[in-house]
Amino acid sequence: MQIRLYRPDDAPQIGALFRRAILEVGSKDYTPQQVAAWAGPEPAGERLHARLSDGRLALVAEEDVILAFGDLEADGHIDFLYALPQAVGKGVAAALYDALEEAARSRNIARLYTEASEAARRLFLKKGFAVLERRDFEVRGVAIHNYVMEKIL
């Protein structure tokens, strides 16, 4: 497996990965209505490309295909950390997270933080994050939740 910088031509694969992760992995912890609202009706590739190309560090893990992607904003925020369903539990997202943390340390970022889904919360807890609070909110009119988490480096 190789971890590398995100490229604009990754956008279609990233969009498909994002939707599959939500629909297949998210469905283990969220209702069908919550999953549908989270995934959204629109293709995700263009929207994700705009976000991942705004100056933040964006990485992908690949092995023939992109298995996972994640990002690190300048203030230590991790907005995305998603893996293909077949990569879940195989250390791919953990390795990608480790690369993001290493980049944060090299940039003298003192604190990492995120808003994590149920599945992501489990990974971030293993990586030393603490849950600060559960957030209950609405997406497209559907009640859903995630967790505000942080790790002091």
Image: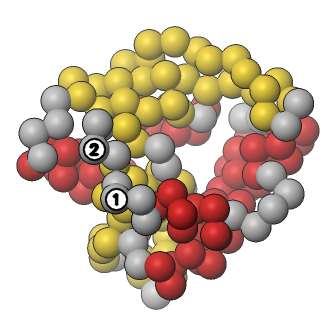
Q: Position of residue 80 (x, y in %)?
A: 49, 49
Label 1 sits on residue: 55
Q: Secondary structure at mark 1?
A: loop
Q: Position of residue 59 (x, y in %)?
A: 36, 64
Furthest residue in direction top, as rendered: 133
Q: Position of residue 2 (x, y in %)?
A: 31, 76
Please indicate, yes or no, whether residue 89 appears anywhere in the rendered image: no
Residue at 52% x, 39% y: name it: 120
Mark 1: which amino acid? Gly
Residue at 62% x, 18% y: name it: 135
Q: Is residue 27 above or below residue 99?
A: above
- Pointer 1 or 2: first along the chain: 1
Are circles 1 and 2 on residues that touch, CB within 8 Å? Answer: yes
Label 2 sits on residue: 74
Residue at 73% x, 21% y: name it: 137
Q: Is residue 61 above or below residue 104?
A: below
Q: Secondary structure at mark 2?
A: loop
Coloring applied to the structure: secondary structure
Please indicate, yes or no, whether residue 28 appears anywhere in the rendered image: yes
Quadrant (top left, top right, bottom left, bottom right) of the C terminus = top left
